[in-house]
Amino acid sequence: MAGLFNDPYKYVIDSSALFDLKKNYSPTVFKGLWDKFNKLCDEEVIISVREVYNEIKRGSDWLVEWADQHGKIFLEPTSVEEFRLIGKLQEKEPSWIDMYSDKPAADPFVIACAKTKNLIIVQHELSNRNLPRIAKELGVTCYRLQELFEAEKWEFQ
């Protein structure tokens, strides 16, 4: 699924999936998984949005360092269409972004990125939560990590 100017983007990853990777797939134990994951990030097959980066940066563990090392994958909205969709999503779910808080809110940015660039969202929320529910309403596919591993045909011994 190439985007504008043949971008290699295929997936946009939410912080919930990155936090799940951190919690359940330590790179010291699952080195092969992280090698494959990092390769897709390095090739920008997996991207994310700046708000996910900001959510990660609120922490103080090795995932912050990982995010800094992979900073190029965390994109800002670039098209008018993407900005408009973020605005519409904010109208639909006003609790997503608190204008009076410095707390990042990635969900509308992740959904708008996926919708405008025709990407699959990789996330770890239950299907009745806002991100997967609204993505589905917009015709955007959501994967959990296991589905990403299967779609990429990753096998480990």
Image (cartoon, helix red, strand yellow):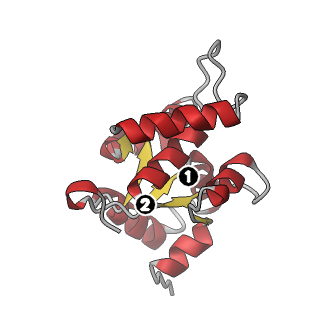
- Tag 1 or tag 2, which sits nearer the N-term? 1
Where residue 46 sits, quadrant-wise, is: bottom left
The outermost residue toward the right is 128
Q: Nearer the viewer, residue 7 or 50?
A: 7
In this orientation, does residue 145 appear?
Answer: yes
In this orientation, does residue 76 appear?
Answer: no
Instruction: Indicate the position of residue 146 as horizontal and vertical percent values.
Output: 61, 73
Secondary structure of the residue carrying numbered label 2: loop
Disc 2 versus disc 1: nearer the observer: 2
Instruction: Indicate the position of residue 11 as horizontal and vertical percent values.
Output: 44, 61
Q: Which residue is label 2 attached to?
A: 118
Where residue 79 sits, quadrant-wise, is: top left
Disc 1 marks which amino acid? Leu
User: Which residue is drawn at the image coordinates 33% and 38% (left, top)?
Assistant: 78
Q: Which of 92 and 54 is in front in this view?
A: 92
Mark 2: few, some, or many residues within 10 Å (few <14, many ≥20)? some
Instruction: Indicate the position of residue 130 as horizontal and vertical percent values.
Output: 72, 47
Q: Which residue is label 1 attached to?
A: 18
